[in-house]
Image (tube, grey):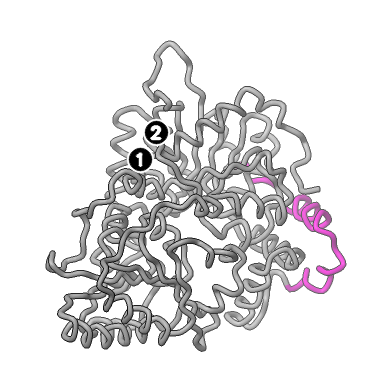
Amino acid sequence: MYDFGVNLFVRRIRATIVFQSDVWFRNYLESGNLEHLCHAYDLTLILDGTMQVADKLLRGINRLASLRLCKITYTIKNSLDAQPYETLFDILLWLNRSKSKSFKYRIKRNLILTERIFDVSVAEHYSTINNLFQDEVIDRFMAEHQCSEALEEIVLRSRPELLLMPSAAYEAITNDILRNTRIRKKCLVVMMIDNWDNLCSKTIIPWHPDLVTCMGKQQVGFAADIHGIDPQYVHAIGCPRFDIYRSSFTNSDTIQSGLPSLDCRVQYILYLGSSQPNNEVSILQQLSYLLASLNIKCGLNQHIVYKPHPSRRFSSQDVEQIRAIPYVSVDQDSLSGIFNISSHDLFPSLDGYQALIKNASLVISGPTTMVLESLLCGKRTILMTDDCASYSSNKKLYDNLLHFEGIEELPGLEIMPTISHLLECINIWLHSDQPYNPIPYNKRLEYYLYFDEIPWAHRLIKVLTDYLPMCGQLRNDDRKME
């Protein structure tokens, strides 16, 4: 266990962390990992000026600043034009489409959504794109687009020895920093991949960081096979937001905080929605009809708590339908999303997630990261892979996204290809005489999500401790893929 008390007689390493997303900022702050990093390093925070930081998060970061645990600047806004990078990412996605079935699906989905693969700015490149090698594309980009001097000045102002970048692997700011040789010569640059699919579904990383951290061993393989990054510089240490589940390792009792507004005697099935348009309203209606019958017949008091995906938006007709479904309650933290309130409240606090999952009788989910979170909490989990007319139905996501491969082998997870299969399964389960017992944590889950009893920041710092003394040896002038 690391001691994060500040030793006044030892100079702490100067570290800078760049946040470009409210979600990442929330994950690091509310999980407590940002404060751990503040204690471990002389930390400067750079926040993208386009972020709409919620009041609760602002209070948290101001507390850290008032304790002199970190310094803050909000000056990235408009420091570079993202459009050229988006064009580059599309081209690299196309050139490398054979490396990941997720790439092919992304291209096909974009074609359906926009009736073209690339936007107008790519059209002039498209006629020659298949005659170019990837290095030629990157060389042309570097010749036509200089690094942002404004962004360089912002980063170097904090004199970082260590530069930490939470990332989805395809941000303009991240890549502008990665290709900036003046920044790269002065500090160790770490790309911290923040979600399950980021290394297999977005695009190719054209300039490699010194180190990459990711969720699990599966993503280490993606980094090597898809991006050509040496696996010795890729570390599977999990992600910050999963730290909210650490008490699940030591406490299997029901958690009382953050529950939906139901009578304490009511049992509930938790339905976790997908970010993509599909037929969730229909599933909720059919589940409600089943429960109406079983509650009377079996003397049960089961309800459904529906937690829509934070980025999902609903039509007013859908909202009225959901509100009218018997036995269905919408998770309180999700109400601002389902009723289309401002993006300020787009992603709810992490506080209620563990309680919501652990107190559920059963968890039903679309193909999302929440499947892993439910299994992490020891819950029997049903993954819906039903099909519908949507270009992004549960079935299409499950079949076409590379990171879902093999998850059907995880203990405690059941795949439901149709709504009728789901209803039959729940009917059998609710008629069972034996109460459902929690699933013991299984090490096979670590292939997708590394997890242990210590905070994520401790794992990160352990990795960095091994590399910081030799960071000068990691530098070289050519950062492109070979």
Q: How many labels does the image show?
A: 2
- Residue for point 55% across, 50% down: 216
- Name the quadrant containing residue 235: top right
Q: Where is residue 227 in the image (x, y as percent from the top left)?
A: 71, 53
Left-right relation of 56 to 479: left
Spatial CA span between label 2 and label 1: 7 Å
Q: Where is residue 109 in the image (x, y as percent from the top left)?
A: 60, 77
- Residue for point 62% across, 71% down: 106
Label 2 sits on what residue type? Answer: His
Report the disc number at residue 36: 2
**In the rendered structure, does residue 245 fall within the stretch colored magenta?**
no
Q: Where is residue 193 in the image (x, y as percent from the top left)?
A: 55, 49
Question: In this rendering, is residue 326 above or below 361?
Answer: below
Report the disc number at residue 32: 1
Label 1 sits on what residue type? Answer: Gly
Q: Position of residue 61 (x, y in %)?
A: 33, 40
Which element type, helix, strand or loop, lies under badge 2? helix
Please name whichever residue, 129 or 338, is drawn nearer the observer in this view of the structure: 338
Decide: few, some or many residues near mark 2? Use Cα within 10 Å; few <14, some 14-19, many ≥20: many
The magenta stretch is 123-149
